[in-house]
Amino acid sequence: MSDDLPAEVQALLRERASARAQRDWTTADALREQLRELGWEAVDAPRGSTARPLLTSAQRGAGYADDLTLDSVLNEPASVAASLVTVADDHPDDMVRLVDGVRLHTQMIDHELLMVANAPAGGAGSLPQPGQGETMLEVRQRLGWADAVNLGLRRARGRIVVLLDTSIEPTGDFLSPLLSSFDDAKVGLAGPWGVTSADGRQFSDAPPGDVDAIEGYCLAIRREALQQVGGFDHHFRFYRNADLDLSFAVRANGWRALRTDSLPLRQHEHRAWTAHDEPERDRLSRRNFYRFLKHWGDRRDLLLHSAPRPGPAGRG
């Protein structure tokens, strides 16, 4: 258990650990719900239990972020053409590179930039400071990947909301052609990297056109589609395969996912991937993929080019 947790949370975790040791699951579940009411989610592990901040649709006074940061505006009408959302855990130079490119190449487009400072090691002060049309959303406890992204998505006011990974560097006007993809009213998702699958188990890169899923390095979503699905499933604490899950959720509501032509975006080292050694990457990726399969493994109707299913599961 971390000493950084609020005293009340630590006390509930100790009570819950005692209940679990006595196999009193009813009490343990009740204490889990008390933690959720305080804005925390119990996380059980072999070495003991701890808690992580919980991002919910109506949470206030959570202690790890101010109420304005936590308030959602997603169900309000759009007030700008595009919202660009990015999350920084650490590596502030990556955020600087992305934001510099956004500022240089989106000047003529009605947009806002939302930067989520997910408790970076150097604090929010190490990140680019927001200018006009830019907002810094700061949390004091590290959120899981999906919750951090969702915090930005929930504050977005754009007709189209664009998730940008900090490994991306804009080298030209990427936003205009990306937004034009949504001229077709049936397109709910778009981006320059997309994948397809014949069996829902093995996914591979797809050419421009309709795809099964858009990858999260640059993922644009229509506001109406985002309102329907509410964002990423918060259980995805690691990024891998969360984009598949969101894409299928959007397409299950009848929207198209469109891979665009190449956009002027340069990919650099993906820190969320290289921060882990190979066994840990594999473990986290598989856990997320099994979560995706639990949600969508039986929805072969969502595959554009369905074929007989082979044996082993995995993502190409």
Image (cartoon, helix red, strand yellow):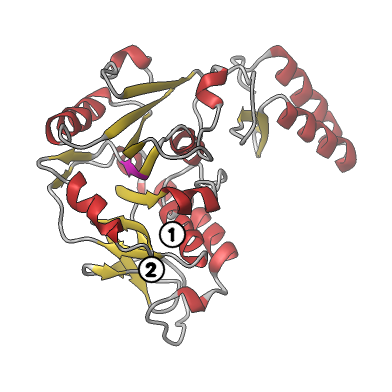
Residues shaded magenta: 160-164
For mark 2, give the secondary structure: loop
Q: Residue at x 54, y 61 (%)?
A: 290
Kindly give the residue lying farthest to the bottom in the view shown: 308
Q: Residue at x 62, y 35 (%)?
A: 56
Q: Position of residue 199 (x, y in %)?
A: 44, 78
Query: Residue 7 appears in which quarter of the rendering?
Result: top right
Residue 215: which numbered mark, if any? none
Residue type at mark 2 is: Asp
Magenta includes 81?
no
Quarter of the image where the C terminus is located: bottom left
Q: Position of residue 126 (x, y in %)?
A: 29, 15
Q: Is residue 176 left or right of residue 55?
A: left
- Whichever of labels 2 and 1 marks the residue nearer the N terminus, that label is 2
Q: CB atoms at circles 2 and 1 under 8 Å apart? A: yes
Report the residue marked by disc 2: 212
Magenta includes 162?
yes
Q: Is residue 49 visible?
A: no
Residue 247: which numbered mark, if any? 1
The residue lying toward the viewer, choosing from 270 and 254, is: 254
Q: Residue at x 52, y 64 (%)?
A: 253
Q: Position of residue 99 (x, y in %)?
A: 22, 29
The residue lying toward the viewer, choosing from 233 and 184, is: 184
Q: Position of residue 39 (x, y in %)?
A: 66, 27
Q: Residue at x 71, y 20 (%)?
A: 9
For mark 1, give the secondary structure: helix
Q: Is residue 288 above or below residue 267?
A: below
Residue type at mark 1 is: Ser
The overriding secondary structure of the stretch rendered in magenta is: strand
Mark 2–mark 1 Cα distance, whole angstroms, equals 7 Å
Q: Is residue 166 left or right of residue 38?
A: left
Q: Is residue 24 above or below residue 180?
A: above
